[in-house]
Every structure is written in C-alpha cells, then in structure tokens.
Image (cartoon, rainbow, N blue to C red):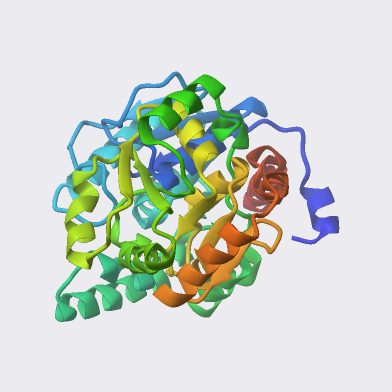
Amino acid sequence: MNERARQEARTDRRFTIGMLAPCPFPTHQGTQVLIRHLAAALSRAGHRVHLVTYGYGEYDEALPFRVHRARRFDAGLRSGPNWTKPAADAAMLVAAHRVVKSEKVDLWHVHNIEGLALGALLKLHARLPLVYHAHNAMGPELPVYFRRHITRVLASKLGDVLDQTLPRAADAVVVFDPDQKTFLEVSGVSPQRVHVIPPGLDGSEVAPADPAEMAKLRERYGGGPWLIYAGNPDPYQNLPLMWRAFALVREKRPDVRLLMVSHHPAAAFAGELNSSGAPGGVVFHQYRDIAELRALLALAEVGLSPRTLWVGAPIKVLNYLAAGVPVVACRSGARHVVTPECGVLVDGTAEAFASGIFRLLLEPLDRDGCRTGFERFSIEAQVPRYEETYAALLRDAG
C-alpha cells in the first residue's frame, strides 16, 4: 500500500475483530507468542479482539482481550499434523459460530492454513470479510514432519494444493516479507490483496533481565562463552545442522558451551541430539517463566537459528535481537530479519554455521545495535498497518 492509499485508509474507527488461532493458546511457541502480542497490541489501541482457540493452553495468563475456548480435544503442544487436530479444529468452528451470534464482529483475522480453512467456512455462513495471516507455506513445510520419502513427496504435493487454492478465499492476506508475497501472487492471489507486514513482537517481554536471576544462573551453570538456542524441537528448526556446527566449534574451542533453552523438556531434544553425535558442552534448560528466559538470553554471547526453511519468520531471532543478543542464522531462513549490525547470515552448512559462530566470538557485535535492529519489528509500530488493512477491507466491502 503506497503512502497516499495509507492516508485514505486511515480511520479513527475502532474495530471488533474475530481472531482464529487453531492451536493451544497461550504457549511459548513462536506462532502463539506473535498472535498474543498482536491481539494485545490491537486491544491496547482500542479495538475489541475476540480470540477463538483450542480448549487448552500451556499456562494461564491474564490477557487484555477476550479468549473463547472450544471444547477440549488434546492435540498436544507440538507443531505439525496429528489425528486429534481435525477434532480440535471442528470444535473451534462451533465456538466461532457462537462468537458470530453473540458479538458484532466486523471481520475475521485468521492464522495459519487451518484458520484459513475455518475462516472460509465462516465466510460462507456469516459473510464477514476475511483476513488470512500467512505464517508459513504448506508446500515447503508440511514434508518436514514426515520421515519416509514417499510420505514426504505426498505431503509436499498436498501442501502445494493448499497453497494454490485456500488463500484465494481470503479478502486480504498478510505476509511477512516480499518473497512470500511473490509466492502467493504466483499461486493466484491478486497482488492488491497481499499486504507485507513484518512479524511483530513486544520486545519489552524479553528485556531487561533481572540481575539476581542472572546471578543464580551463573552460579548454577558457570562461565561461558555461551551460545544459546531458545526455541522448540520441531523438525523445521533444522537442529541437526546446529549439532554438527557445534561439534566443529568444540574441536577448536572446547570452552564454548551451548545452552538449549525451551519450554519443552530435554527429552524432546535428546533423541535427535544423540543420533546426530553432538559432543559434550550442551546444557538443557526448561525455563519456567519469561523472567527466567530474559536472564538466560542475557547470559549468551551468540544466539543461534539453524532454520533453513525460506518461508515464515524465526520468532526466536526477534527475541534474540530484542534482548540484544547477536545472531548467527541461515541466510535462507532469516534474510529478512538479520542485518550486519546485529548478526551474521551464513549458508546452510555446518562449516559455514561454525564459521559464523567463530566470527561473532572473535569480533562481538554491540548489543545495543542488536536492540536497534529489533525496532522495525516492534508490534506497537505495526498496529497502524493492520488498522489500514482492516479499514480498506471494510470500505471495499461496502
């Protein structure tokens, strides 16, 4: 949207937004964090947000927006397909219909492909405008959840079909970067309907750290230098690359240690770690709350993101930047996030990844520069762009 169109789209109107999050909520998973921060920022801006989600989450938290829970079908906390998720999604559709009847919703803002499928059904029933927030693309991502070659091929084909059909049902599509916009346009979505809005977070959630909390962790784990991976063990994270790179680092720098920080237990990582043959020097820490995560990030010299999947946004990298942690990331997975002022982009090989780690250990980047690099991903600064998208959509709908 050019500046003139933005001026025309601006409005003081406050919207009532129905939001579909087909996942456990809230959790510490990147997608759920982004959804929570977006819904909270919209609420702080004066909009009414009604979020429809699964019947359970990872923890309880007072939220500044209304959460409508579907009937509980426990599909676990991990990403990827399983046999329970269709039932959980169907229960969400029932809950969303209740919201349509009880609230004067202006539009639906839906997340991920499952949310789009549910939103398309709601659109048939309620005739409300539909905004699809495309966190990923199914063609590239769906195969990573399977191991057998034939299953991966079939998953890729199915993902391609979903990418080329379902987004056309949306009246507007929000993507994270220009590459994803081009991908959707090639798949048949009108360019006028695709809006590029970078992923946004509330950076204050991970900074600054409590010195007392940091002191406890230093006493527990000792000195570094520390690398950190703060994320989940899902296949799209490409963790085997990180294990191999860390092994190369330890050959030359046995003093370097890797802190694996997650809301998942160590057992979720251990099988993959053992099969990949990573050396010692790895410490697993299942954090209990955000205050502890802040302190863990503050201990680290370098944050790691081995993800090579080209579509989507590595939320962990945004957390690193907000906390002032320089980043080594694969170019294909973080090219729209990491700049030379806040990290190093490398090819997706163990040798290149290890080289990037050595570079930042030898030539540390300024932590304040990393925090400055985060500013363009501040969710507060992005709220007007969502408001513009909503206003233009409702104006076009008459």
Is residue 46 rendered to the left or right of residue 86? right
Position of residue 237 measured from the top left corner of the image (x, y, whole percent)? 36, 60
> Which residue is at a point 32% across and 38% down the rendered structure image?
285
Q: Is residue 223 above or below residue 343?
A: above
Q: Is residue 310 above or below residue 90?
A: below
**Closer-to-camera residue (243/329):** 243
Residue 276 visible (yes or no) = yes
Position of residue 19 measured from the top left corner of the image (x, y, whole percent)? 46, 39
> Which residue is at a point 38% across and 43% down the rendered structure image?
29
Numbered label tally? 0
Tell me where residue 218 sits by quadrant: top left
> Which residue is at a point 58% across and 51% down the rendered structure image?
199
Is residue 382 rendered to the left or right of residue 305? right
Is residue 48 rendered to the left or right of residue 309? right
Position of residue 239 measured from the top left corner of the image (x, y, whole percent)? 33, 62
> Which residue is at a point 17% across and 75% down the rendered structure image?
151
Residue 103 visible (yes or no) = no
**Closer-to-camera residue (283/329):** 283
Q: Is residue 41 above or below residue 393?
A: above
**Closer-to-camera residue (6/80):** 80
Tell me where residue 220 sits by quadrant: top left
Quadrant (top left, top right, bottom left, bottom right) of the N terminus: bottom right
Position of residue 181 measured from the top left corner of the image (x, y, whole percent)? 58, 69
